Amino acid sequence: MGSLLQPCNFLFLLLLLSIIQGNFGRKIANHVHDDDQHMHVRTSSSSSNMDHMEISWNIFFHIEDLKLGKKIPLYFPIKNSSFTPHIISKQESNLIPFSSTQIPKIREFFSFAQESPQAKAIKHTLMHCETPPLEGETKFCATSLESMLDNLSLIFGLGEKFEVLTTKKTKNLIPILQNYTVLEDPKEIVANKMVGCHPVPYPYAVYYCHGQVNDNRLFVISLEGQEDRQRIEAVAICHMDTSQWDPHHVSFRVLGIEPGAAPVCHVFPQDNLVWVSSHSSAT
């Protein structure tokens, strides 16, 4: 697959996540923040018809948009590294309860009041992690790098090599909702297995990871911002079957469709990880 994929090993992943987080620290964060509260956001004229929606929802698009020269309204968030939870080791995470049945102990460990925003974020994340998977879906929440790699090894198969894809920018990205032009024919990554890992709100770094054996399609798209001329190599996935999804999922509102009516595509923010088998190929 050439340079599209990055080799997977523990030191590389540690470096990658540290760069993504903008922080090499290992100290447990003392508080949980809503990322949107610390993001300097401005909208462009191209988003005037989306003012009633959350800007951060603008990661979704139609599969028909994957064409050379197509303009897609997208928003790529930037996290403030001052508020980014730190990575901790498996040994450290094993000392801290991670279950909705243990929320009082977790609050006590971090000294969070019961009705505090931090306690509510912990409850929401734990419930999200414990929600049963969809039919054919595999999911887990990784509380450390070691646990992420351990779970991925089980999914891909013991002894199977796997590699990571991330969205990349060419310079300092300005968080702005704008039209992005597709500069080249999108490259499709043909992979029999893929797992996406998304950071979720928690006092330390936790990733919600999930994958599904179906006809999802993975792409790498070269984009250029209409207003700031920022170039981005974005990783994107198209979910071809959304019939099992919650009808209130925000993607349906953004795209104006109903569950199962059409594929739902979305780009991955820079701090997300997409894992595929090393045997995957680009077309």
Image: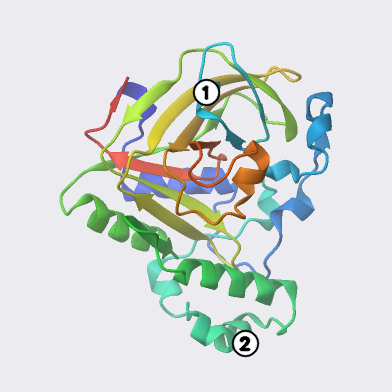
Q: Amino acid at mark 2?
A: Glu
> Vertically, is 183 above or below 189?
above
- Disc 1 crowd rating (10 Å Cα; few below 14, some 14-19, many 20+) is few
Residue 132: quarter of image: bottom left
Image x and y of residue 6, in percent = 36, 34
Judge by depth and name the residue closer to the eye, 228 or 89.
228
In the rendered image, which residue does mark 2 sit on?
A: 108
Residue 94: quarter of image: bottom left
Residue 147, numbered label: none
Is residue 58 something that shows in the picture?
A: no
For the residue labelled by badge 1, is the local secondary structure a helix, a strand or a loop? helix
Judge by depth and name the residue closer to the eye, 218 or 256.
256
Image x and y of residue 243, in percent = 45, 49
Is residue 182 something that shows in the picture?
A: yes
Judged left or right of residue 121, residue 8 is left
In the rendered image, which residue does mark 1 sit on?
A: 64
Viewport quadrant of the N terminus: top left
Image x and y of residue 216, in percent = 38, 39
Nearer to us of marks 2 and 1 is 1
Label 2 vs label 1: CA separation? 50 Å
Residue found 62% across the figure and 67% down from its top? 29
